[in-house]
Structure formats: C-alpha cells, structure tokens
C-alpha cells in the first residue's frame, strides 16, 4: 500500500511542478488605472534585473546593487529619448514576493508614461503578465500557500475594517497553520496504519482501534469548529444583503436616507414612488450591509410599478435578512407577511415598526420600533442586524476563520472521509480501508493550501485577480 501511495503522490508532484514554472520575464502596471502622483511598473523573472539595466541609467548598474535597494535614474526608450525620471527598487531571488528576481519602477502617474515603459520592456523580450500571475508565481515558488494567495485578492478587495482584518488573518497563515496541523496528524496516523500492513504477518500493532477513533474524532471536532466559522467568515468577506420591504408609504426610503445620511431615495406621500430596487452599502461597526430599498408590494395596473414589484420579490428571495417595515399607526399587514413567507423563512424576517414619533395610542408588536424621521430606535435596529448577522460567534484577530466557499467545500469533503474512516475503525475493518479514507481526507485538506492542486483550479483562482498582482 505505501508503494501505491508513493507512486500516486509522486505523479501529482510532477504534475504540480510542471504547472507553470515559466522562465519568461513578465511585466504589468501594479497601480490602479488612471492619473495619479505615482505609478509602479512591476517586472519579475530571471532576466528582470538585466533587462531593467538595458533601459535604466543611474549612478551604477542595477546588477551591481544589493537586494532591497532603491535607485534614482532615468528610463530611456529604444531611440534614446528619456521616458521619465524614476525610482527603481530591486529584489534579488529568492528574497522577493514572487521568489524570482523582481524590479519595481516607480514613475510619475501619467498613463502615457507607464504605457511607454511597458512598450520598451516588451521590445526587450518581456511579456505582459496574465491576471494574478505575480501571486501565482509566489505560490509556485513556495513563498506562500494557496490559501494565502487567495487572501491577497481578499486584502485588495476588502471594503470594511472587519473584512480587511479577516483577509489579513488568512494572509498571515492562521487558516493554513490549522490545515497543516490537521494534515500532519492524518499523515502520521495513516503512516502508522500502513506500517502495520507491512508487518501484518508479525501481528505488530502501532495504533489500536480505540486510539485511532480518538485521533479521528479529535480532527473532526476541530474541523467542525472551522465549518461553524464560515457563516461569520462569509459575512465579513461578502457583507449582508438586507431587503427593506413594506406597503407603499411606510417609510422605507426615509429609513434608507437616514442610514445613509443623504437623500438617496425620493420620499413622497404618493404611494408607489419607488419603482425600482435602490441598492446602497453601509458599514455598521465594520460589517458591510447591502441595503435594497424595494418597491412597495401591492396590486397595480401600472406596468412599470408591476416590474418594480417583481424585482422586489427577487431581492427578498436573495436577501440574508428582510426588514418588514410597517407604520405603527396602521394595522400590521398579515397578508404581506404571509407573502414574504412564500419566498423566505421566518428567521430571516425582522419586524420593524416605523413612525413612533407620530404614534397614537395603539399597541404594536415588533422586533424593533423606530422613527426614520428622528432616528429614534435606529441604533437598536443596527444592533439587531449585527446580532442576526454574526450570531454569538466571538473570533479574535488570531482566530482561524473560513471565508472562502472553496475552503468550506474542501473541509466538508475532509469531514465526510473522516466519518467513513471513523465508522471503519469502529467496525474494526482492515487497515487498508481506514488508510484509504484518511489519505482522501488528507488530499481534501491539501487542496486548501495547494499541496495538491490541478492546473484548472489554479487558473480559476488566479484569473479573478487584477493584472499586476
């Protein structure tokens, strides 16, 4: 059995080694498109410093300089004309982000200048980088694992402080360390089982069934904790979709305007003013909430309003939570509530009574009472939204949190294989069956950090990166 596994892993190793170890030197603009004070052109590859020397003139050649140093000089085009005054940073392999020789040219932030620099580099044999290729090379050269590589994109795209901390957590290797520890435990356990198979005739036992069950259960318990963190991780990464729903003229647009502190929605006493979905985002204590002000749901003969109501129902179906807003001076709309239950579940609906500043003597049962005009009760609504979004989860900056659906699915597969192995151990089946499932569990974990990854998976991940990263 060990020989079979060795052949399998050696073939996978060869496959990974040949994925994209290219000797090409690549380049791209690493700063955002548009005009700014400074722009950076990045170059990576074995010949990057030598090629930069061909177009850069400073006090001395870059190839003579030490790594992690910055040099002032001028960049010239192929005709000998000056393109720009620049600062050039050099990073000598393996001490760079990609693990290769790297050069970063900082020029004035005029797109014409960066365009000319890229053109002259292409003339020297450098090629344009593909999306995410710098980070991909960092992964292939062992500078970061796959989970950390994905975290680079999350750091760039984070829109709130909490999501940035979560991405930073993953980039620092919190999740990777957990996964690596799980893999080590499984590898050690499966190795002992496979060793027993080699000594089957001598009936030597390296790990008993009871101990085996204890080890597998321990890993399953920890994986369950990671799986539980996904809901919180998804919230901090993607935000929370909240649909504002109610009969016409109950104050949905007024509530949205108060939260945003601007007149984003038209407020009118005329029913049916909102004809389309108005989408806005707001950060509440670091959590991103995506608010959807929907058209009032009611029967209408107006074709435009009918379309607005249809879109409202779609927004409700896709929402994480639905704020059902009602006027505290009117009767609660049981009909609308029942209609909501046709497209969502009760746990997602938050009953909110509005216009308490105008409230007459009438009892009104709701999860929260507010005034969209004065702001009374809105802080309590925020706390309610936060509580529903993150539940009772308490995670620190040093906690391992799952924010990526790919990681979640790999952990689910890992748990499934471990449960099968656990059942085999309880039934005292032969070690081959248990070892097989443990190895499958290990493979699923390996997919998270990229110890075993197909070319298709890597291309899919890095294709979502911006060019220059």
Image (cartoon, rainbow, N blue to C red):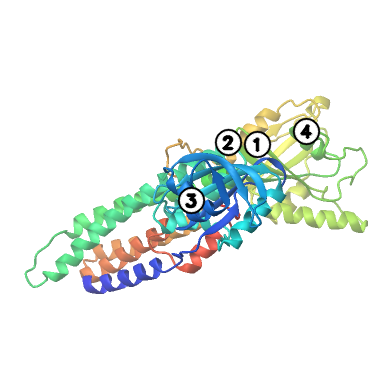
> Label 1 belongs to which residue?
283
Judge by depth and name the residue closer to the eye, 407 or 457.
Answer: 457
Seen at 72% across and 31% down, the residue is 369
Q: How far is disc 2 from disc 1 in space, using C-alphas? A: 9 Å
Seen at 54% across and 59% down, the residue is 26
**Where 364 sits versus 337, above or below?**
above
Seen at 90% across and 56% down, the residue is 304
> Label 2 belongs to which residue?
161
Seen at 68% across and 49% down, the residue is 113
**Where 150 sits versus 283, above or below?**
below
Of badges 2 and 4, the one in the foreground is 2
Q: How far is disc 2 from disc 3 in space, using C-alphas? A: 31 Å
Instruction: Point out residue 192 in the picture as x, y percentages from the top left corner.
Output: 18, 61
Tell me whether circle 4 and circle 1 mark residues in contact (CB < 8 Å).
no
Residue 103 is left or right of residue 304, and the answer is: left
Tell me which label, 4 or 1, sits earlier in the chain.
1
Instruction: Point out residue 120 in the picture as x, y percentages from the top left corner.
Output: 62, 57
Tell me whether circle 2 and circle 3 mark residues in contact (CB < 8 Å).
no
Residue 354 image label? 4
Instruction: Point out residue 415 in the picture as x, y percentages from the top left corner.
Output: 38, 58
Tell me which label, 3 or 4, sits earlier in the chain.
3
Q: How far is disc 3 from disc 1 in space, using C-alphas? A: 38 Å
Please tell me how crowded label 2 is: few (under 14), some (14-19), or many (20+) other residues with Cα within 10 Å: some
Tell me which label, 3 or 1, sits earlier in the chain.
3
Q: How far is disc 4 from disc 1 in space, using C-alphas? A: 22 Å
Residue 69 is left or right of residue 362, and the answer is: left
Judge by depth and name the residue closer to the eye, 246 or 459.
Answer: 459
Tell me whether circle 2 and circle 1 mark residues in contact (CB < 8 Å).
yes
> Label 3 belongs to which residue?
102
Of badges 3 and 1, the one in the foreground is 3
């Amino acid at each position: 059995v060990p020989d079979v596994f060795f052949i399998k892993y050696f073939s996978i190793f060869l496959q990974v080694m040949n994925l994209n170890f290219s000797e090409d030197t690549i380049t791209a603009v690493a700063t955002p498109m548009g005009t700014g004070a400074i722009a950076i052109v990045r170059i990576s590859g074995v010949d990057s410093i030598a090629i930069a020397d061909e177009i850069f003139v400073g006090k001395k050649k870059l190839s003579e300089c030490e790594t992690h140093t910055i040099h002032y000089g001028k960049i010239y085009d192929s005709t000998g004309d000056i393109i720009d005054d620049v600062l050039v940073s050099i990073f000598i392999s393996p001490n760079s982000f990609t693990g290769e020789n790297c050069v970063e040219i900082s020029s004035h932030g005029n797109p014409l200048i960066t365009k000319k620099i890229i053109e002259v580099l292409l003339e020297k044999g450098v090629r344009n980088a593909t999306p995410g290729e710098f980070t991909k090379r960092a992964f292939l050269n062992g500078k970061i694992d796959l989970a950390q590589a994905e975290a680079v994109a999350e750091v760039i795209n984070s829109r709130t402080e909490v999501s940035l901390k979560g991405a930073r957590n993953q980039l620092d290797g919190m999740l990777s360390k957990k996964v690596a520890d799980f893999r080590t435990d499984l590898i050690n356990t499966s190795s002992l089982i496979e060793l027993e198979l080699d000594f089957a005739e001598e009936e030597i036992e390296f790990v008993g069934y009871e101990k085996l069950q204890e080890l597998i259960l321990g890993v399953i318990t920890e994986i369950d904790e990671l799986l539980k963190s996904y809901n919180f991780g998804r919230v901090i990464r993607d935000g929370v979709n909240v649909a504002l729903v109610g009969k016409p003229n109950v104050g949905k647009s007024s509530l949205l305007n108060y939260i945003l502190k601007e007149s984003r929605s038209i407020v009118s006493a005329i029913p049916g003013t909102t004809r389309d979905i108005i989408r806005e985002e707001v950060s509440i204590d670091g959590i991103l909430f995506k608010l959807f002000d929907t058209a009032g749901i009611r029967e209408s003969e107006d074709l435009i309003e009918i379309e607005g109501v249809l879109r409202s129902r779609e927004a409700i179906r896709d929402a994480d939570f639905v704020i059902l807003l009602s006027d505290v001076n009117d009767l609660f709309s049981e009909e609308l509530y029942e209609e909501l239950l046709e497209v969502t579940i009760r746990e997602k609906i938050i009953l909110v009574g509005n216009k308490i500043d105008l409230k007459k003597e009438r009892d009104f049962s709701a999860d929260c009472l507010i005034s969209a005009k004065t702001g009374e009760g809105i802080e309590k609504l925020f706390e309610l939204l936060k509580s529903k979004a993150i539940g009772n989860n308490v995670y620190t900056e040093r906690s391992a949190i799952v924010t990526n659906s790919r990681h979640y699915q790999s952990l689910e597969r890992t748990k499934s294989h471990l449960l099968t192995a656990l059942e085999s151990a309880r039934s005292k089946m032969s070690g081959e069956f248990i070892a097989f499932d443990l190895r499958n569990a290990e493979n699923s974990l390996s997919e998270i950090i990229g110890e075993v990854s197909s070319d298709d998976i890597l291309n899919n991940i890095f294709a979502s990166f911006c060019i220059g990263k």
